[in-house]
Image (tube, coloured by chain):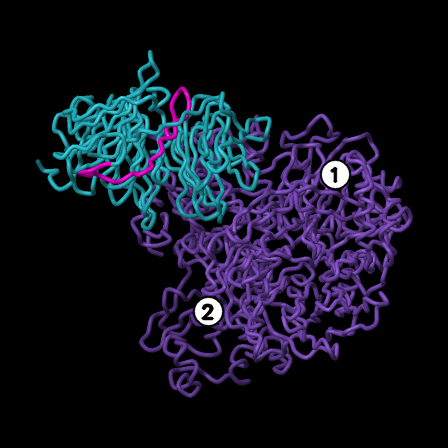
Amino acid sequence: MPFVYTEWQHFTTKDGLPNDHIFAVKADGPRVWIGTEGGLACYDKRTGKFRTWTEKDGLPWRVVSALDVDPKTGDLWLGMFGGGLARFSGGRFDHFHQLNSGLVNDVVYGVAVENDNVWAATTAGASRYNTVKRKWTIYTEKNAPMEEIWNYGVSYNDGKVYLGVWGSGVLEFDVATERWKDYLDPDGEMEIDLYRDDGIVHVITTGTSYIDRVLWVSTYFGMCRYDGRHWRGYYAKETGLPSDFGNAVKGRSADEAWYATDRGLAAVMDFKTDTWVTYTMDPKTHKGKAVVQRGSTVLKTIALEKTIPHNYVLWTEVDGSDIWVGTSKGLAWAKGSGYYPRLKAVVDNRAKPDASLTTGDASK
Amino acid sequence: MRENKRTCRLPSGSLAAILWSTTICITIGSAGAGEKEVKTPIYVGVTQCTKCHQGEEMDYQFCIWLTSKHAKAYSALAKPEAKEIARLSGIPQEPQQAAMCLGCHATGSQAEEWEKDETFHIEDGVQCEKCHGAGSEYMTESVMTDRKAARAAGLMMPTTADCMNCHKVKGSHVAVLKSRKFDVDQAWDEIAHPNPSLWKHPKTKSLPKPKDSNGAKYIGSHACGQCHKGPDMGYQYSKWLGGPHARAYAVLGTDRAREMAEAAGVRGNPLKNAACLRCHTTVYTEPAGVTDTHAISEGVSCEACHGAGSEFALEAVMRDHQGAVGAGLKEVNQATCMKCHADAHGKPFDYDKACQQIAHPKKIAKPTAAIHYKTPLYMALTPNGQQLYVTCEASHVVAVIDVESQRKIAEIQTGRQPTGVTFHPSGQWAYVTNRLDDSLSVIRVADRKVIKTIRVGDEPHDVLTDKSGKTLFVLNASTDSISVIDTGTLDEIKRLEASRSPWALDLSPDGKRILVTHALPRLGKFRTAPVSEITVIDVERAVVEDRLVVPQTNLLMGVAWHPSGQFALATENRTKTLVPMTRLLQGWTISNGLAIIWQDGRVDQVLLDEPNLCFPDPTDVKITPDGRLALVTSSGSNRIAVIDIERLIDVVEQATDDEREHVLPNHRGKPTEFVVKHIPTKDSPRGLLITPDGTTAFAANSLDDSLTVIDLKTLEAVNRIDLGGPKEITKTRYGERLFHSANITFHRQFSCHTCHPDGHVNGLTFDIEPDGIGSNPVDNRTLRGILDTAPFKWEGTNPSLQRQCGPRLAVFFTRIQPFTPTELSALDTYICTIPRPPNRYRPLGAELTEAQRRGKVVFLRTRTNDGRLIPKERRCVNCHFPPLYTNRTRQNVGTKMWLDRESRFDVPHLNNIYDSAPYLHNGTADTLEEIWTRYNPNDQHGVTNDMTKDQLNDLIEYIKTL
C-alpha cells in the first residue's frame, strides 16, 4: 500500500491569501512562498500566519506565476505573468523586465535557479541571467533546438536544466557543457501515441522535474517518465491520472511524482508497481477522496473530509513529507505525518493495510 | 597574402567558431533572403594597398602616405612626450599598449587578432584602412574599380569631419606638445592623395624585388620589430620607424627627389632607378634572397646595416652574439654608413651626429621614478593590540605601525589600491581588499607575507570576518555585491546582492548581524529624492536578512555598532537634488550627518553641520568601548567630531515621531547639543580606529600620509605618525588636496569629492542653475579619464576644465571666491590624472566573447535587419567613435524632456560605461537597456528599433567592453 495523505488543510483569501488562483508554491524551510493571480504570499508554518505583498507593497506585478528560491543566498525569484522577473531579497523587490534588462519577454511562466544563474521560461524563449556577472543570455530558435519559443516551464537539478516548451517537447541544457538536447515526440504532433513508450508523449509540454536521474514530464496530452534510457508514458485511461491535461509535475524521487491536472491531483507513488494515488474533490459536497490504483485497477477508495480545494490543479510542491497544492480555488497543505516512500505492507494512516500490497511482492 | 584569409577569419578552429562565423557573415548588414552575403572585413595592412596605389601611374599615393606623419603615428608613442601625455591623462599603461592612445595612433586597434591579416602590422601607424575601412572585401581589383561595389564592400571615403574624431584638440597633447590648433583644411591638403584623373594601375602589381640569390634572405623590418620593441628594448623598432631611414624609399616619390635626380643627371623615375634605389632601399640592386615579409618600400631598414636576417633573426641565435655574428649579423661601423652617405647629393656627412640621430641602444635611461604617495585609508588592529595595519591606497602597501612606539615598522606589498583591512580573530592572518585588482590579499601576520591572493568582485572596498573567523564578508563596490568566503578554503561560497556601491560594514556585538553601508543611493524614479540602503546580513546563515531604507541620503560610508547592540551609527550625506544647487546660500543643499540605526530597523537622522560650521564629507565613525563617545571624521574639513552619545540619544528620544522624521534630519541647531568637540587632523582624514582599551584613537590622514593619534581622555591630538610618504607636494597632490577640501564652498559644506567620490559619480541627477525648480536636470558624470573629452557639461558649453572648475564652479556650486589660477591649475591637473579602472568586461588583451563579438557587429552596422541603409549620423560608431567613444559633439538623440531647454546634448564617452548608471543627460535611464527600449522611440539615438531583443543584449555586452 502506498502512503495516502489524509490530513489536509485549505487556505483561501479568507485565511489571508491575496488571491485564490494559486499559480506557484515554493517551500523554503519554515516558510512557504505562494504565487497567486493577485500577489505574493508567505506562509510561516511555525506561526500559521500569512504575510502578503501586492503592488502597493512594492511587488512589481500582480500576477506571480512562478517561484524559486536561491538555496545559497536565500533570495526568492518570482516569475510574473506579463511583468517579467523579480528578485525578493531582504524585503526589497528588484524588477527585471524586457525594457530595463536583457530578459527576453515579460510573460514568464516558469523560473528556476541554477547555481548562480536564474532561468526564466517565457512566451518568447528562455532567458538565463547570471547574477554574479550580471549577464543575460537568451535562448530561442536561433541558438537552441527550440522549434517553438513558447516556454511553459523550467526546472533545474543535478546539473541539468529542463525546459518544457509548447510544441517543442523538452529541452535539456547540460550546465557543464552548455549543450542542448531535445526530446521530441517520435509521433510528431499527433495527439495519439502510435508506439507507446517510444519517447515523450507529446510536444506540448508544460512541466518537467528531474530527480534521482529520472525526468518526469507533464504535457497537455499525457505524462511521462524518462530514466535516461527508457521512456514511460502515462494516460488517464490506464493509470490513476484523472486527466491527460497536465499543468505541472513535481518528482519526489525516481519512484514518486505528483501531477497537477485539470481534474485533480495524481501521484505515481511507486513507479515499479505502477501504483497511483489520485486526489479529487466532489464539487457538490466539497468532500474528497483518494483512490489507490495499480495501473487502471482500483485497489482502494478512501473517502476523506478534505483533499484538494478544487480539481483544477495548477501546481504541486514537495515539502519534506508534506505536499502543497495550488489550485484555481485555493491552496492545500497535505501533511505527511508518517509518510513512507513507495509501498508498505503495514501502514499507519487511515488507509487500511492490504497484505497483498507489499513492496516485496510488487511484481505480482 | 593567401586568398582564403580575405574572408572571415576565425578566433579559433572550433566548430562553434565556424558556426559563429557563418552567422556573423550573414548577419552584418543583412539585406534579407536572396541578397548577397556580406562578410566581415578584416584589416590587410598598407602593404596590400601598396600593390596598386604606388608609382607614377597612381600619383605616388603610397609615398605620400609613407612620408606623412600618419606613418609615424605609432612610433611617436615611444617618445617621452607620449609617456607624459599618458601620465597627464591618467593612462597607466605604456602608450604603445594603451587602447586610448592606439585608438588614434594606430589602425584597427580595437580589432581582435582574427580581424587582422598576417600582412597587417599595427606598427605601421595610421594606415589607409584607418580612414578607408578594413580592406579585405574591397581590395580586389574588380571591386576597387567599381566604386559602388567597393563602397558596398566597406570602402569608406572620409571627410574632414572624420579626421576630427582624432584631431580635435586634446588638452593633454596641447599641454605637452604645445601644439598649434589643428587646421583640418591645411592638413587635408598635406595628405591629399587623389587618384589621378587618368589613373591606371602600375604595370607591376607589386613593388619590385631584387634578383634572387642563394644564401641568407632579407626578412624585413617587421620581423626585427617583433622583439626589438617596447621599453625593455629601448623602443628600437619605433626609433627606426620614426626616423628618416624608414622613409628613404618613399622620398624618392616626391617632387624634390625627382628634381634632385634630374639635377644629378639621373634619367627616369627615381623609384625605378637603380642608382637611387641602391641607397634608398635595404637591398635591391644586388642579387639577394628575400622572403615575402620583405618589401623595398621599407626603405633603409635594419638589415641594410645589420645584414640579411634569415639566419640570425631567431631569438635563440640573437641571444648569442657570437652565434649571431656567425650567422650573418654584421657589425656596424662608419664604413657601413659611408657606403651611402659619403658625399651623397653633395651633402656633408657628420658620422657622429648621424649616429646620435639614429641611435637605438637596447638600454635606455630609466625615467625618474614617479612620486608615489601613501594615501592611508583604513586601519585594523592585531587582536593582541600591538600592531596597527594601515592600507595605503596609492603605494599599494599595508603599513605596519607599532602601537606602543607609534612608529611605522614595516610595509607589506599587497595588490593595487588596498582599502579595507581586517584580522582573523586568531590574529594569524590579515585580509586586505585590493580595489584596483578586484582581489583579496591574505597576509600571514607572523612573517608579514601575502600568502594568497584571491579573486573577489569588482572594486572590493571593505572586509570583515564573523566572530568565529570561519567566514569573510567582502564588499564589492563596483558590482554591488558581497562575497562570502570560507576562510578555511579561501573559496567564495556565494555572492549576496547588496545595494549600490557597498562601502563599509560592522559586526554587531553579539556577532549575529552585519550592517553594510552604501556610497551610492538606490536607483530611483526621476525627480525624486535619493534613498539609500543599509543592508542587514544574518551572519550565521550568511544571507541578507533585511534592507533598511535611509530616505533622502547618499554617501552612507562609515558604520559602527554601539557596544550595547541597541543601535549603530552611520555617516551620511543629505543632498537635495530637487532644488537648484544655488540654494546653497540657504545652507541646506548638501548637508552632512549621521544615521542612527536601531535594532528594530528604525532609522533616525541628525545633522553634524552647525549654522556656520559645516561638517563636510563625514567618512568614518567609531564608538569608544564604553559606549560613551563616537568619533566621526570629516575628510572635507580635516576635523574629527566628538559626539556624546548619551546626549545624542536624548535629542532623538525627546523628539516626537514627526520631528524625528521631518525636523531632526535637517536641523542644524541640534549638533551643538551632542557634538562636544572638534579635533583637528591633517589633510583629508578617512578611516578611524579606537583601541580596545578606549584610551587612544587613530585617524588616517589620507592626503598627508600620516596618522593622527588622539588621546581619548583629553580629546586632544597628541601625535602624528609619519607613514613615510614623499615630502614633496607635487602639483597633482596639491590639486588632490583641493579636490577633497571643502574650503572653497560657501560655509564649507562640501568638496569636489562630495559629488565625485573618488573621482567618480554619486549617482544623482542635479538641478544646478537658478532657472526654476527642476529645470534642466543633469546626471552627474564621472571624472575618470575626463581630460580629453572636452567640451564639458551635458550641454557642452564649457570648453575646458579650467572654465568648468573655475568660474562655473563659483557661480553655480561654491558661491564664493573661485579658485586662484594656481589652485585651479593644480586642481585640473589632478582631475585629469584620475585614472579609468581597467575594463572589467574585457581585460586588456582579452578576446571578445561571442556575445560581445555579435554586439560589435551591431555597433558597427550600416544596415538594418531588413536591409535599409542606416544614415551615417545614426550609426553607433559615428558619434561614439573610438578610442574615447565620443566624437565630442552635441547631438539631438530625442531625449529632450519638458524640463530641458536644450535638445542637443554632449555625446558622452563610453569607457567603462557599465559602472556609471543612471544614463542619459538627465539620468532617466536606470539601465543601458532603457536607453533604447524606453527613450529611443523614433530611432534618433541610433537606429535600434528594428533590433531583436537578443541583438540589443549583444550590443550592450559589447558596449560594456569599451
The reply, left or right, for residue A177 in relation to residue B690 is: left
Kindly state the secondary structure of the residue where label 1 is placed. Answer: strand
* Residue B935: percent from left, percent from top: 59, 30
Q: Nearer the viewer, residue A107 or B349?
A: A107
**Amino acid on which disc 2 is placed:** Gln
The picture places residue B770, in percent across and down from the top left corner, at: 84, 34
- Dividing the picture into quadrants, the one containing residue A189 is top left
Q: Position of residue B539 (x, y in %)?
A: 55, 53
Check the image and report above or below for A326 versus B788: above
Is B786 on the left-hand or right-hand side of B617? left
Provide the residue span drawn in magenta: A325-347
Outermost residue toward the left in this view: A364
The rendered magenta stretch, by its main secondary structure, is classed as loop
Chain letter for the purple colouring in the rendering: B
Q: What is the display colour for chain A?
A: cyan
Q: Quadrant of the C terminus of chain A?
A: top left
Check if residue A344 falls in the magenta segment: yes
- The residue carrying pointer 2 sits among few (fewer than 14), some (14 to 19) or many (20 or more) residues within 10 Å by Cα, namely few
Residues B454 and A104: in front is: B454
Q: Are marks 2 and 1 in contact (CB under 8 Å)?
A: no
From the viewer's perspective, tell me whether residue B910 is left or right of residue B406: left
Q: How much space separates mark 2 and mark 1, taking CA atoms?
A: 51 Å
Instruction: Give the answer, above or below, for where A333 lies relative to B322.
Output: above
Query: Which chain hosts label 1?
Result: B
Q: Amino acid at mark 1?
A: Phe
Give the SS element for disc 2. Answer: loop
Residue, disc 1: B766
| Mark 1 nearby-residue class (10 Å; few <14, some 14–19, many ≥20) | many
Pointer 2: what residue?
B226
Give the residue displayed 57% in from the left and 40% down from the top.
B878
Q: Earlier in the sequence, mark 2 or mark 1?
A: 2
